[in-house]
Image (cartoon, helix red, strand yellow):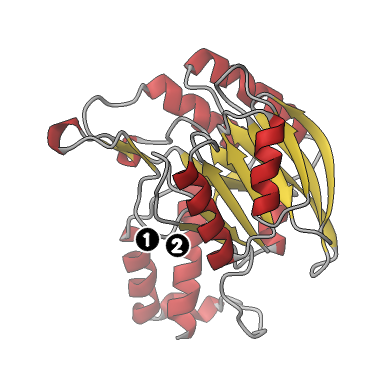
Amino acid sequence: MKILMWNCRGLGRPLTVHNLKGIIRSHSPEIVFLCETKNPSRSVEQKLRGCGFKDWSLVNPEGTAGGLVIAWKEGLEVTVINSNHFFIAIIVKDKVTNHDWCLLGVHLSTNDQIRSQQFGELSLILQQVHGEVAIIGDFNTITNQREKKGRNEKSPASMACFNNFFNDCELVDIGMIGRPFTWSNRRTRGDLIQERLDRVLAGNGWLQKYQNAAVLRLSESGSDHAPLLLDTNLRHEQSKRRFKFQEQWCAVPEVQNIIQDTWRDEVRGSPMYSFAQKLKKCRHRLVA
């Protein structure tokens, strides 16, 4: 399953709509989440029909700001369970794996205090889905200073609040393939600022079902945010025997070197994501 997410910064501009249609033609996502649509429902619905969608859940903007929509392809079983001005929550029935899971599309506030309150509201929803969840969208904050380039550093309190949210809720940052930042102020040289504001967080139950899931950063055009594509099965691998670490390997110097070298590598993302990626790399090198 492929899921497109994009802070499009307004669906009223022809260039934005043109690029959205191009992305959908190229990648054929079953679900699309857009934030900052900035247009009334009638206009957004018209654009969605033009992109080939017939089913959706909308949150209207407040004046000319905000606005959310999740749209899904015909035939996909989706139930909308909750929504407000900063999120839409749906239950998706995956016919391939034959299980239900929660998808949360979010657009969080730029205000630290308001965003902290929003994390609290999301936590209440997460308590009900028991790890069978993926959260996508624009979080408007970063986890560490490496996710920002240019000018002033982010507030440590802001980053701590975000890290506490997904650690307390036992979420994992899936990471991203492509350039490291998702937003730019589009200025040049010393005035250029870039940050990783958009991402996918997932619960352990969801990750166990979609072990090959990956997030692709697509080229930005028509917005200062890059679109992201969540592919729940990026690598179509044949079934393999389950990997088991053998205790006798501990005495083999080559194995010790592989583990030490892998753990020295820097992996961008949350501590849980970094740990999972290093385990995966160790496994691949040990069985190679």
For discs 2 and 1, the disc positioned in front in the rendered view = 2
Percent position of residue 78, x then y: 83, 50
Q: Amino acid at mark 2?
A: Lys
Question: 273 or 246, which is in the foreground?
Answer: 273
Of all residues, the one furthest to the left in this rendering is 189
Mark 1 residue crowding within 10 angstroms, few (<14) / some (14–19) / many (20+): some
Percent position of residue 202, x then y: 63, 48
In the rendered view of the protein, which quadrant contains the C terminus?
A: bottom left
Query: In this picture, is 213 found above or below 270?
Result: below
Q: Amino acid at mark 1?
A: Trp
Q: Is residue 134 visible?
A: no
Percent position of residue 81, x then y: 83, 36
Of all residues, the one furthest to the top in this rendering is 113
Mark 1 lies on a secondary structure that is helix
Write down the residue under mark 1. 263
Asked whether the beta carbons under mark 2 and mark 1 sit within 8 Å of each other, the answer is yes
